[in-house]
Image (cartoon, rainbow, N blue to C red):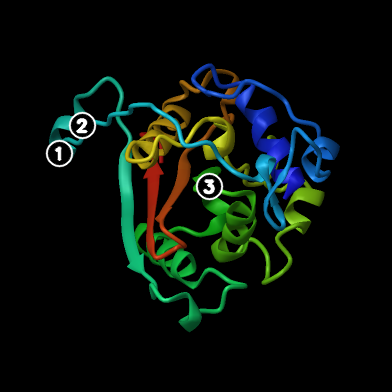
Amino acid sequence: MAEISAKNHANAMANPLAQLHKPLPVEFCRVVSEKNPMIAAPLKVTDCSLVSDGAAAIVLVSDRRAASARRAVRIAAMEQVNDLLPMDGRDLSFMEGPRRAISAAMRSAGCSLDTIDFAEVHDCFTIAELMIYEAMGLAGPGEGATLLADGTVRRGGALPVNLSGGLKAKGHPVGATGVSMHVMAARQLDGDAGEMQVDGARRGLVFNMGGAAVANYCSILEGNAS
C-alpha cells in the first residue's frame, strides 16, 4: 500500500491540476510516525485520500455531432453493478462488484485487458487500488502487489494506473470525482495529457465506486483512432 501511495504522488507531480504536488517516499508511507499516524490499522494517513473541493464537466453529444467535433472521445461501454450493502454477507478479501462491473464493460466494448492502455480507478484508500487490480483480472486474489514489483501499473508499464495521481493525490472532490476521472482519461485519448501522456493511447478504463464497493461503475473510453 505504501508503494501505491508513493506511486500516485509521483504521478501527480506531472499533473498541474493535482491538489497534492508533494512526492512521498515509500519508506515514509510505510512507517507510522507523528506525521503519518495510524488512522484505522493498517491504514495510515498516507493511505487515505483527501476529501476536497473541485469541479469537473463533460459534454455528451450524439455520434453524428461528435463526428464533426474538433476533439471527441467515444464511450465504448458504461456498466454499473450493485453489490450487497451488508458487509457480513460479503467476502471482504475480494471486490466482487467491481469485478462484475469491469468484466461487463469489457464485454460490452468487445475488448480485453491487453488492449487497455491506461486506467483511472477509485483509490479512495490505497487498499482499494490494490484490490481493484485483482478485480480487473490483472492479478489473482492476494497477488496484486506483484504488479507494483514488476512495474505493470506504473508509468511506462503495460497498464499504468492513476497517472493523474488518483484520488490520493489528484484529489477526491466527492460528487465531481467520477467526472474528473473521465476528463483525465479523455485528455489521454486526445493526446492532451501533457507530462502524463501515454504515447499512442487509444483505449482507457475508468472505474469508480460508491461506499464500500457497493455501487460500482466502469467505463471504457476510446479515442478517434480506435
Disc ID at residue 124? 3
Q: Amino acid at mark 3?
A: Cys
Residue 104: x %, y % from top left: 39, 66
SS state under label 3: loop
Residue 142: x %, y % from top left: 71, 69
Q: Amino acid at mark 2?
A: Ala
Q: Which residue is mark 2?
A: 66
Q: Earlier in the sequence, mark 3 or mark 2?
A: 2
Residue situated furthest bottom in the rendering? 89
Confirm or deny contact between disc 1 and disc 2 (CB under 8 A): yes
Q: Residues within 10 Å of mark 2 (few under 14, many from 20)?
A: some
Q: Nearer the viewer, residue 15 or 34?
A: 34
SS state under label 1: loop
Q: Nearer the viewer, residue 208 or 125?
A: 125
Disc ID at residue 62? 1
Q: Amino acid at mark 1?
A: Ser
Position of 14 with respect to 95 (left or right) is: right
